[in-house]
Image (tube, helix red, strand yellow):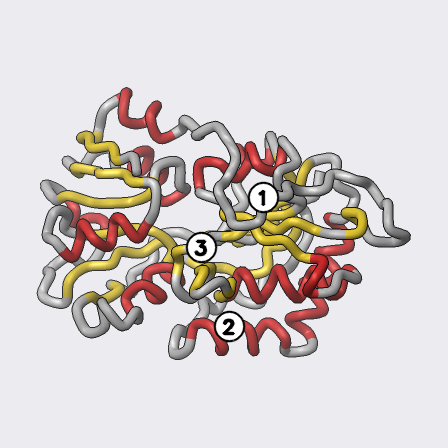
Amino acid sequence: MRSTHFRIPALAAVAALTLAACGNGNGDDGDGGSTGGGEGGDLPFGDSITIGTKIDQPGTGILIEGEYQGMDVGVAREVASRLGYEEDDISWQESPTPQREDMLVNGTVDMIAATYSITDERKERVQFAGPYFVAGQDLLVKNESDIEGPEDLDGRTLCSVAGSTPAERIAEEYADLDIDLSTYDTYTLCMEALAADRVDALTTDDVILAGYAAQEQWAGQFRVTGNTFSEELFGIGLNQDSEACEQVNEIIAEMWEDGTMESIIEDNLGDYTPSDANPPEAGGHCA
């Protein structure tokens, strides 16, 4: 696993965060995505669909004993079902944060649901259905920590994932603070660094942090500060040539209207309380 360690502010640091890793994900399904535009009747991706998600984020996307679980997985599975795909038609693929756009552009996957924040920069390469959920960037710290928000990070060591929206926000919006930012390939590696006191805090979306804090091995050791400092719109990433975007928007709206989204959230996130910005209005991010 790659890790990067540097000081902010620094022009080199900001540049490093904008680089995206190349190559395909290493999920356990190696068939690759179908880029077809309608083989298999009305099915938008052909007879089968390949979905990218995270495999190490408890509560949102995680692979446990061969089973994909989490809010994002539940959303993607329900969307695929309403598009006409049976469970056996779905292949799952790990989609690491720095590789997501490449995987969609290259056709490795048909769509991605992986706490994938909708941003203007990403929309230059892919399109998004949704958003299906609104989260906010926050900090995870040890229970005894005096850190309550980003203003308390001056002179501290912070961890996030390379190429992620949270890491880029810290680099761009808090450049006046002396933050020692370490970036890793996964939030799991950040959690290990936090547990070992190699960093003082971990930053990403609050829903991801809550999932980590609730894991059995970490239970009772960490807390989410509860002071969000962004609004993150989670969308379903699609290749810009896909014609399924508006159809998926309609499905997402239906899932909120009929209570499916609330059930998915409760089943996977337990006591987590979603932002009042939910349910979001889906639409406006298709190519």
Q: Is residue 195 above or below residue 46?
A: below
Which mark is drawn over residue 265? 2
Question: Which residue is identified by label 1?
Answer: 30
> Which amino acid type is marked by label 1?
Gly
Splitting the image into 4 quarters, where does residue 263 fall?
Answer: bottom right
Q: Which of marks 3 and 2 is nearer the N terminus?
A: 3
Q: Quadrant of the C terminus?
A: top right
Question: Which residue is identified by label 3?
Answer: 55
Q: Earlier in the sequence, mark 1 or mark 3?
A: 1
Q: Residue at x 19, y 30 (%)?
A: 6
Q: How many marks?
A: 3
> Which amino acid type is marked by label 2?
Ile
> Which amino acid type is marked by label 3?
Ile
Q: Which residue is drawn at 29% across and 44% down?
A: 160
Q: Is residue 242 rendered to the left or right of residue 19? A: right
Q: Nearer the viewer, mark 1 or mark 3?
A: 1
Foreground pick, 63 / 269: 63
